[in-house]
Amino acid sequence: GESVGLHLPTLSVQEGDNSIINCAYSNSASDYFIWYKQESGKGPQFIIDIRSNMDKRQGQRVTVLLNKTVKHLSLQIAATQPGDSAVYFCAEILNTGGFKTIFGAGTRLFVKA
Amino acid sequence: DVKVTQSSRYLVKRTGEKVFLECVQDMDHENMFWYRQDPGLGLRLIYFSYDVKMKEKGDIPEGYSVSREKKERFSLILESASTNQTSMYLCASSLYPGTTEAFFGQGTRLTVV
C-alpha cells in the first residue's frame, strides 16, 4: 500500500501471477482518481482512472476498484509481466473551487521471471 | 504521440546559482505543472499555470519561480539553488485542470552541490 516515509513499499510477484497494489486516499470529497506507472528513468504515465460515482473500472489487464467507505483504491494487474515492473502511485483529485491533485508516495512492483 | 519534453535529464549546479528548467509540450494544453519528486514523498506541486502569463503557487513554492510566456513552454526557476533543492523535477501538462490525466515529461534530476 501507500506509505509516507523514505522507503517505498515493495510488492514482489511471480511472472504470470496477478498483482494488487493498494492506496489509501486522504479526502472523502475527492471525485476523481488516477493510477500512474513510473518506470525507472521516466516520467509517470497514465494507466487508468475512475470517478467517485463508480466502484470498478476495467482496462486492458488492469482493473481499478474504489471503496469510498474506507477511502481505499486498488489497482489489479492480471497476468503480471516483467514489463510491469515499475513504481505505481495513485492520485486523487479534489474540486474545491479549484482542482487539487494529491499524489500517493507509490509502491514499487518487482516481477520475477 | 503526445509529448512533454524537459530540456535536461541531469543537471549539476553549485549552491547559489540561478537554475532554469525548461519544459515544452506539443498538445496545445492550457494547464502546465511543475512537481518535485523525492523518495517516499510522492509528487509535490511547486507551481502551475492555467494560461499564458498566468501562474499559481502550489504546495511548496518557496525558493522557486516560474515563467509562462508562450502556451507551449513553462519554465521553472531556482533563484539561488540550495542543496535541499536536490531532487527529481517533473513537468506535466493537461487539457483541463484536474479532470483529465496529466502527461508528464521524463524528468530532470537536479543535484545542487
Image (tube, rainbow, N blue to C red):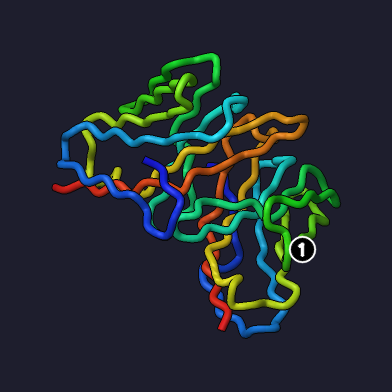
- In the rendered structure, the answer to whether residue B95 lies left or right of residue B103 reads right
Note whether B83 is above or below A103 in the view shown. below
Count the marks: 1
At horizontal 15% and vertical 42% (from top left) the residue drawn is: A14
Locate the C terminus of chain B by quadrant: bottom right
Residue located farthest toward the right when viewing the structure as drawn: B53
**Residue ID at (16%, 48%):** A112
- Label 1 resides on the chain identified as B
Please report the residue visible at 57 percent of the width from the left and 68 percent of the height from the top.
B8
Q: In which quarter of the image is residue A17?
A: top left
| Residue under the point 69% across and 74% down | B19
Q: Which amino acid type is shown beneath numbered disc 1?
A: Ser
- Residue B80 appears in which quarter of the rendering? bottom right
Instruction: Answer with the quarter of the image where residue B112 lies.
Output: bottom right
Position of A29 relative to B86 (above/below) = above
Location of mark 1 (residue) = B65
Residue A32 image point, x, y percent: 57, 27
Residue B54 position in % (x across, y down): 84, 49
Secondary structure beneath dot 1 equals strand
Left or right: where does residue A14 sit relative to residue A83?
Answer: left
- The spot of residue A31 in percent (x, y) is 60, 24
Check the image and report above or below for B97 versus B62: above
Packing grade of label 1 (10 A; few <14, some 14-19, many >=20) is some
Horizontal and vertical percent position of residue A19: 26, 35
Looking at this rendering, what residue extends furthest in the front direction?
A70
